[in-house]
């Protein structure tokens, strides 16, 4: 791993997402969908369907079903866990460092009346659960923000039952050589201090005690995500009546372009990992 401009703290991360949640919900997506999409092909431009496809693929790889108890670490606005519960009947809890996103998730859960699902404010480095509490731990594009990644891996391992499954997608730092543009538009923009390459991520999970079953590069999908989002943003900006909204959307469109450039330079990536906690001997 290598650091960016400086090391951000958990407080930096939580404050950033608390401060930006309402802006994002107001100007961009009232449902709070924030995850990277898994696209059907190069011509696919349906971001929300692609984001749902990521969730469904991860759930299938993890083997989540009606008997599962699931912890979603870095759950954000709760969409992934609520989708899992609706499609499989699983029970579980979502945890996030942003209190604003947890409040949104709690409100959405109450509105839908989803049984067996709850959301809690907390840190991935100090999970408020007993050892072996969950059959599955999942996460979408969130763990990269944790400053102390080894500690979060140890905590997820601890709360999994023996034989339990960890299934995540996450952003990658493929190289230690990060240029100024990527630092500004990809890393520092969201308070991301450091990351792993695909192989480095798998090695870190192995070091935490996991048996890695899947380590898959998904860079083409993340590039398509930001291409589609950038095009959508420019279209929305052209029809936005609110000057503040138009300015925010155009800034987001510009960032999408810079992020694509960082991907092309090999400075930003995306991967999927599925790992198992060994069964008790």
Image (cartoon, rainbow, N blue to C red):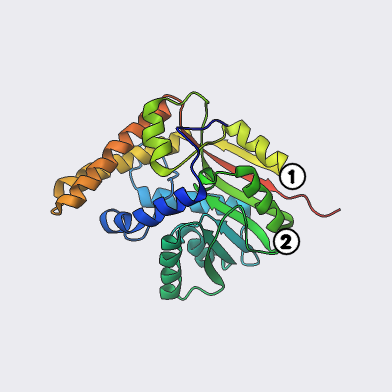
User: Disc 2 versus disc 1: distance between alpha carbons?
Assistant: 14 Å
Secondary element under disc 2, as helix, strand or loop, is: loop
Disc number placed over residue 194 in the picture, else none:
none
In the rendered image of this protein, does residue 86 appear above or below residue 207?
below
Q: Which residue is rendered at x = 37% and y = 52% of the image? A: 48
In the rendered image of this protein, does residue 118 appear above or below residue 186?
below
Q: Is residue 34 left or right of residue 176?
A: left
Of all residues, the one furthest to the right in this rendering is 281
> Where in the figure is residue 91, as x and y percent of width and height?
59, 68
Of all residues, the one furthest to the left in this rendering is 241
Q: Which is nearer the eye, 175 or 43?
A: 175
Secondary element under disc 1, as helix, strand or loop, is: loop
Q: Is residue 44 left or right of residue 154?
A: left
> Where in the figure is residue 67, as x and y percent of width and height?
65, 67
Q: Is residue 163 left or right of residue 189?
A: right
In the rendered image of this protein, does residue 76 appear above or below residue 39?
below
Placement of the N terminus among the 4 image quadrants: top right
Q: Earlier in the sequence, mark 2 or mark 1?
A: 2
Residue marked by disc 1:
209
> Where in the figure is residue 60, as x and y percent of width and height?
58, 53
Residue marked by disc 2:
132
Q: Which residue is rendered at x = 67% and y = 41% of the image? A: 205
């Amino acid at each position: 791993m290598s650091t960016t401009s400086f090391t951000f703290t958990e407080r930096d991360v939580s404050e950033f997402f608390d401060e930006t949640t309402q802006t994002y919900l107001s100007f961009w997506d009232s449902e709070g969908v924030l995850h990277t999409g898994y696209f059907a092909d190069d011509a696919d431009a349906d971001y929300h369907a692609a984001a749902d496809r990521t969730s469904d693929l991860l759930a299938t790889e993890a083997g989540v079903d009606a008997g599962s108890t699931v912890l979603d670490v870095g759950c954000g606005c709760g969409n992934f866990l609520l989708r899992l519960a609706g499609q499989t009947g699983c029970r579980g809890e979502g945890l996030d460092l942003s209190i604003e996103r947890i409040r949104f998730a709690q409100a959405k859960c109450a509105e839908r009346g989803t049984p067996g699902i709850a959301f809690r404010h907390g840190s991935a480095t100090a999970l408020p659960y007993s050892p072996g509490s969950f059959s599955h731990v999942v996460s979408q594009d969130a763990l990269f923000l944790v400053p102390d990644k080894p500690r979060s891996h140890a905590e997820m391992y601890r709360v999994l039952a023996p034989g339990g499954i960890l299934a995540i997608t996450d952003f990658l730092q493929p190289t230690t050589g990060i240029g100024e543009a990527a630092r500004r538009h990809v890393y520092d923009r969201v308070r991301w201090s450091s990351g792993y390459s695909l192989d480095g991520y798998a090695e870190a999970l192995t070091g935490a005690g996991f048996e890695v079953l899947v380590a898959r590069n998904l860079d083409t999908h993340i590039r398509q995500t930001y291409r589609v989002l950038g095009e959508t943003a420019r279209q929305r900006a052209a029809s936005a009546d609110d000057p503040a909204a138009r300015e925010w959307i155009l800034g987001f469109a510009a960032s999408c372009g810079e992020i694509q450039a960082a991907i092309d330079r090999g400075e930003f990536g995306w991967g999927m990992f599925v790992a198992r906690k060994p069964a008790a001997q």
